Image (cartoon, grey):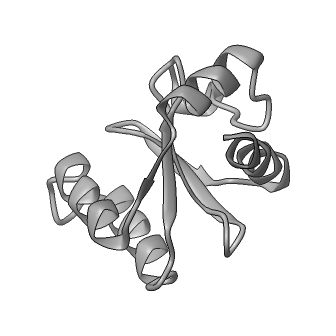
Amino acid sequence: MPFEKFDFETLSEERRKSVAQSLRVISVEEAKKMGEQLFKFADDPWRAAYFNFIAEHPGATFHHGVTSDGVNVIYSYDNDKGMWFIPGSGMGPLQEKGRKAMKQIIEKA
């Protein structure tokens, strides 16, 4: 899926279900380890953005899920902050609708 066409804000029912089914709580350390696996090259601009996001929330507990079309979502319920990323393709912050969807999914779990 091209980066330009991805819009997490239009979270379809299929995507909601796949995020809910794959959702798991991860620690900061697990988030860092996942980032090391996903963004292997030090000069990768998405690596910097990912690790900056993790560093901005040092005591957070994160929720990680994957949509049916391979989009990863990492969200901090306590801070109401999150980001989406497509490994090797792109990433961005979760906007209000995306954060609201993640909150609802977590509260139903």
Asked where in the image residue 29 lies, by quadrant, the reply is: bottom left
Q: Position of residue 100 (x, y in %)?
A: 82, 50
Judge from the rendering whether residue 5 lies leftward or rightward of residue 9; answer left or right. Answer: left
What residue sits 50% from the left and 62% below the top?
Answer: 62
Judge from the rendering whether residue 93 lies leftward or rightward of residue 26; answer left or right. Answer: right
- Compare residues 50 and 74 and report the one nearer the observer: 74
What residue sits 72% from the left and 67% below the top?
Answer: 80
Judge from the rendering whether residue 72 lies leftward or rightward of residue 48; answer left or right. Answer: right
- Total number of numbered labels? 0
Q: Eyeballing the image, is 57 above or below 97?
A: below
Q: Position of residue 43 (x, y in %)?
A: 21, 64
> Can you say which quadrant of the picture contains the C terminus?
top right
What residue sits 68% from the left and 47% below the top?
Answer: 106
Residue 72 visible from this viewpoint: no
What residue sits 75% from the left and 49% below the top?
Answer: 107
- Compare residues 3 and 69 and report the one nearer the observer: 69
Q: Eyeballing the image, is 106 above or below 53?
A: above
Q: Position of residue 4 (x, y in %)?
A: 61, 32
Q: Eyeballing the image, is 39 above or below 59?
A: above
- Compare residues 100 and 23 and report the one nearer the observer: 23
Judge from the rendering whether residue 27 lies leftward or rightward of residue 97; answer left or right. Answer: left
Q: Extreme front residue here?
A: 109
Residue 26 visible from this viewpoint: yes
- Compare residues 25 and 58 and report the one nearer the observer: 25
Q: Position of residue 40 (x, y in %)?
A: 15, 53
